[in-house]
Amino acid sequence: MTTDRAEDVAWLLTADAVRRRAHDLLEEAEAGRLTHFAVDPDKLDEAAALVAEVTRAAYPDLDVPYHSRWRHFVVGANDRWAALSATLGADADERARVRFDLAVTSVLLDAGAGERWRYRDAGGAVLARSEGLAIASFDLFRSGAFSSDPGSPLRADAAALARFTADDLARGFQVTADNPLVGLDGRAGLLRRLGGALEASPALFGSPGRIGGLYDALKGEAVDGALPAEAILGAVLRGLGSIWPGRITLDGVNLGDAWRHPAAGILPFHKLSQWLSYSLVEPLEEAGIAVTGLDRLTGLPEYRNGGLLIDTGVLVPRHDGILDGTLEVGNEAVVEWRALTVALLDRLAERVRARLGVRPEDFPLAKVLQGGSWSAGRAIARQRRADGGPPIRILSDGTVF
């Protein structure tokens, strides 16, 4: 076991820390020393078969895009970003800035919506969960809600975000007493703190602060037109670390999505930060910057991937309390679930690639997730439960799941 004094704060703010601590906990689970979960490794092949089947059904040619927010802007045959992009007359750099503005605000509003919330778009389509959140945030962005400049609505800047309220979000997301959104206040607070973070880091976000300024900062880090994926996550964690609700702070640094467990010390996850990093890859690549080392990031410890592992029997709850009632995100059982999900996704990816006959360099984890584990988790949840919800119910504050 480690102690807080032994923690290296800088290391805890890396994907390497997420992966290594997750695999440490997996070793504990395999030795039968965890309180809440056991692991049945024989079920991994069953889970891999389902993921491979879902992947082939969705992408018969195995030309799978990255798992990112951009996938959720496509509903049916309507690609909202492609349609908006066609109207932009901006150069490549400004297009990338706009995509950063959109991706960051949308991802930060992506935490689980709850089972009752729905969004009706301008065409009358009724959307829920991730697709609903994506289109609601897209429409809010397109309306200029995150810009302080009426002449440039397609931007997200510090001045507008700092004054964004829960009422603003409720109007944009069509929230009512009969259409409640989980974590409404938490999401609005996250956007306000984002505004403060933009002002506080002009080296990353420019002055006056704009999310799109992060594109320029990352472009400046590229060497010979290439940028490591870890550099994206590092910039996100440095620039946005102050926006997360205070949980664990070491040496004055807010660790964000990191939680204590008696068997592993501090377990960092950085789920939304990694989801955001995946979502910034395509804007960078479109602008001509090659992103390398994508598999240095980890799988995402959220309820679709984690639910897949429970529903296929890979993860076995050791007591009824896990599946009964509602658990806080910091509950020890939830921390175990998330860490084991990260570690097991690495093993699952190997089996999925073998079944699909693809190489890791051609089929990184970001494609396994998209193909993939997230969709398979949703599919099996619909088979197992009438509401299609996850096997573990989480009391979310809108900033983790």
Image (cartoon, grey):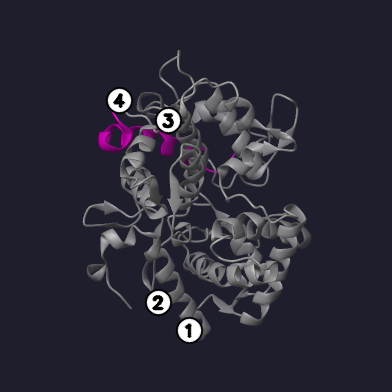
Secondary structure state at the residue bearing disc 4: loop
Q: CA distance from mark 1 to mark 2?
A: 9 Å
Residue shown at 47% from the left, 68% from the top:
332
Which residue lies under the disc numbered 1? 33
Which residue lies under the disc numbered 2? 263
In the visual, does 180 lie left or right of 337? right
Which residue lies under the disc numbered 4? 208
**Tag 3 near tag 4, CB within 8 Å:** no
Q: Is residue 190 magenta?
A: yes
Report the front residue among 141 and 323: 141
**Tag 1 near tag 2, CB within 8 Å:** yes
Amino acid carrying mark 2 in the image:
Ala
Amino acid carrying mark 3 in the image:
Asp
Which residue lies under the disc numbered 3? 93
Q: CA distance from mark 2 to mark 4?
A: 44 Å
Amino acid carrying mark 1 in the image:
Arg
Q: Nearer the viewer, mark 2 or mark 4?
A: 4
- Magenta residues, dominant SS class: helix
Q: Which numbered disc flags the more N-terminal residue, 1 or 2?
A: 1
Q: Nearer the viewer, mark 1 or mark 4?
A: 4
